[in-house]
Amino acid sequence: MTVQIVRGSLEARILELLLSWYPMTEAELSDELGVRPAALHRALLGLQARGLLALEPLEGCTFVRLLRTDLQFLGRQTRRARASPRAAPPSEDPAIR
C-alpha cells in the first residue's frame, strides 16, 4: 500500500531529500533543509513512528535510514509571501514636497 504524504510539508521535504541523497545524518538534513535540529528531530520521530524511516544513533551522529520508498506526494501546500512594505516613490513622498 502506498503511503500518501502532503507535498510541501516538512515530512515531505525530509522524505524527498532522503529519496535523492542517502545516507544522511540528522545534522546534514537540518543544514540542507534549513530547519532547527529540535524541529527536525520531532518530525523524524513522527516519521519513524509511522514506519517510514529509522534513526540509527552512532558515535557522534545519528543516521536517518529510509525504510519505505512507496511514497505518493499529494496536493500542493503553498506558502503565501508576506506583504513587504513598499516605499513610496520619491515624487510621492510627502517629506520631499
Image (spheres, rainbow, N blue to C red):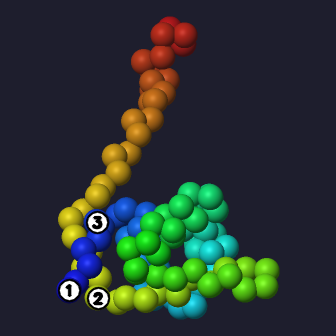
| Neighbourhood count class around disc 3 (C-alpha, 10 Å): few under 14, some 14–19, many 20 upward | some
Give the Cα separation between the discs numbered 3 and 2. Answer: 14 Å
Residues under numbered marks 3 and 1 in contact, where contact means CB atoms less than 8 Å apart: no
Q: Nearer the viewer, mark 3 or mark 2?
A: 2
Residue at image point 62% right, 84% down? 56
N-terminal of the pair, mark 3 or mark 2, is 3
N-terminal of the pair, mark 3 or mark 1, is 1
Residue at image point 42% right, 18% down? 92
Q: Amino acid at mark 1?
A: Met
| Neighbourhood count class around disc 1 (C-alpha, 10 Å): few under 14, some 14–19, many 20 upward | few
Residue topped by disc 1: 1
Apparent side of residue 67 relative to residue 1 in the rendered image (left or right):
right
Q: Amino acid at mark 2?
A: Asp
Give the Cα separation between the discs numbered 1 and 2. Answer: 8 Å
**Can the viewer see residue 13?**
no
Q: Nearer the viewer, residue 18 or 86?
A: 18
Residue topped by disc 2: 70
Residue 35 on image: x %, y %: 57, 61
Tell me: residue 2, above or below residue 80.
Answer: below
Residue 48 on image: x %, y %: 47, 75
Tell me: residue 2, above or below residue 46.
Answer: below
Residue 28 on image: x %, y %: 64, 77
